[in-house]
Image (cartoon, rainbow, N blue to C red):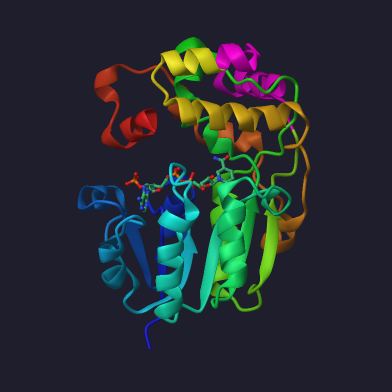
Amino acid sequence: MSDIILITGATGNVGRELVSLLHKSGQPIRAAVVSEAEAASLPPDVPWCVFDFTNPRTFPAAFAGVDRLFLMRPPHLSNIQRDIKPAIEFAAQSNVRQIVFLSLLGAERNPVVPHAKVETLLQKGAVPYTLLRCGFFMQNLSTTHRDDIRAANDIFIPAGMGKTAFIDVRDIAAVATKVLTEPGHEYKAYALTGSEALNYQEVAQLMTAVLKRPITYSRPSLVRFAWRKWRAGWPAAYVGVVSGIYLTTQLGLAQEITEDVPALLGRPPLTMRQFVRDHAAVWETEPASSINAHNMKEVLS
Ligand SMILES: NC(=O)c1ccc[n+]([C@@H]2O[C@H](COP(=O)([O-])OP(=O)(O)OC[C@H]3O[C@@H](n4cnc5c(N)ncnc54)[C@H](OP(=O)(O)O)[C@@H]3O)[C@@H](O)[C@H]2O)c1
């Protein structure tokens, strides 16, 4: 019997780290990529398949011999019944014995978010599941907001002085590795955050100290943020979603610190200082010609 772990979103923030951890540990895995061209960005020797949630013809080859599934909802897919349910149903038919879902902190109290709809499908479905309800990723600063920091030395985020218990995606991948590779995590939900809640003024001070150049937090209003991002070409719906997320931060809903990461990993979560140190090169100003294919994807995402 085959015991392959299928990893969706294998080129994304969490999936990329998870692929690396599981592959290094010798687990049989299959990295799911949307197109063949994306496979080039995977570590060498990682088995991969083309998989698209919106194209069921990609399912049979992707799920062949698969025993466990790491399920990530691509951020632009919000119609869960249409776009995510078919893959969950196919997993059940394929005798997948566990689905680990990358969810959102507080999804159980917020039926409006797409993650809650996925959780409901899993809870009503036939396959044992594990829910990883994650707080804000530190990596939002090195992807979505990278250009503002790199080009203008400014964190341009409408979060007021609200605090966030940021989590490093490397910790999420470590937790996912654990729950996918040891028994006893079926039908469990974990709330994953870092160990400190910071506002963006504190993040800017920390970045200033680590990057050794002044980084400010301009604390824009929601309207100013939305206007500037829309003018810069972000789709209106995406501007709305991101603004809504930062409104919740303003209201103090992102600051709760949980104990599940240290309890599961037996060590404290990675800190924001460590994250900034490890990613310092990402915010360095560099000539356009030195932007490689990998970080160009992040610039465009
Ligand atoms: N950012 C946060 O603070 C935060 C916090 C909690 C939860 N989350 C949730 O985490 C999830 C995103 O995870 P992430 O940041 O690791 O991913 P990500 O970096 O946003 O990458 C998205 C991944 O989805 C893949 N993808 C795009 N369209 C697809 C399709 N039609 N079929 C299959 N795969 C597709 C992409 O492949 P390509 O590279 O080929 O495009 C990429 O690997 C979202 O559900 C988000 O709501 C985020």
Image position, residue 288 (x, y; %): 28, 18
Is residue 280 rendered to the left or right of residue 10?
A: right
* Viewer-side residue, 211 vs 138: 138
Residue 89, horizontal then vertical, whole percent:
44, 71
Where on the picture, by quarter, is residue 230? top left
On the question of residue 278 being in view, the answer is yes
Residue 151 in percent (x, y) is at 44, 13
Horizontal arrangement in the rendering, residue 165 relative to residue 23 (left or right) = right
Q: Quadrant of the C terminus?
A: top left
**Residue 250 in the image, given as x and y percentages of width and height:** 73, 26
Residue at the spot x=73%, y=50% of the render? 109
Q: Which residues are magenta?
A: 198-225
Q: Is residue 138 magenta?
A: no
Q: Is residue 79 left or right of residue 244?
A: left
- The residue drawn where x is 68% and y is 48% is 105
Residue at the limit of the structure toward the left, as seen here: 37
Q: Is residue 145 above or below residue 259?
A: above
Is any part of residue 72 visible from this angle?
no
Residue farthest to the bottom? 1
**Which corner quadrant of the image does residue 155 belong to?**
top right
User: Compared with residue 40, is residue 208 higher up or lower down, i.e. above or below?
Assistant: above
**Going 55% across and 60% down the picture, which residue do you hit?**
101
Where's the N terminus, which quadrant? Answer: bottom left
The relative height of residue 263 versus residue 195 in the rendered view (above or below) is below
Q: Is residue 221 magenta?
A: yes
In the picture, measured across the screen, residue 198 lies left or right of residue 273, that is right
Q: Depth check: 275 or 95 in front?
A: 95
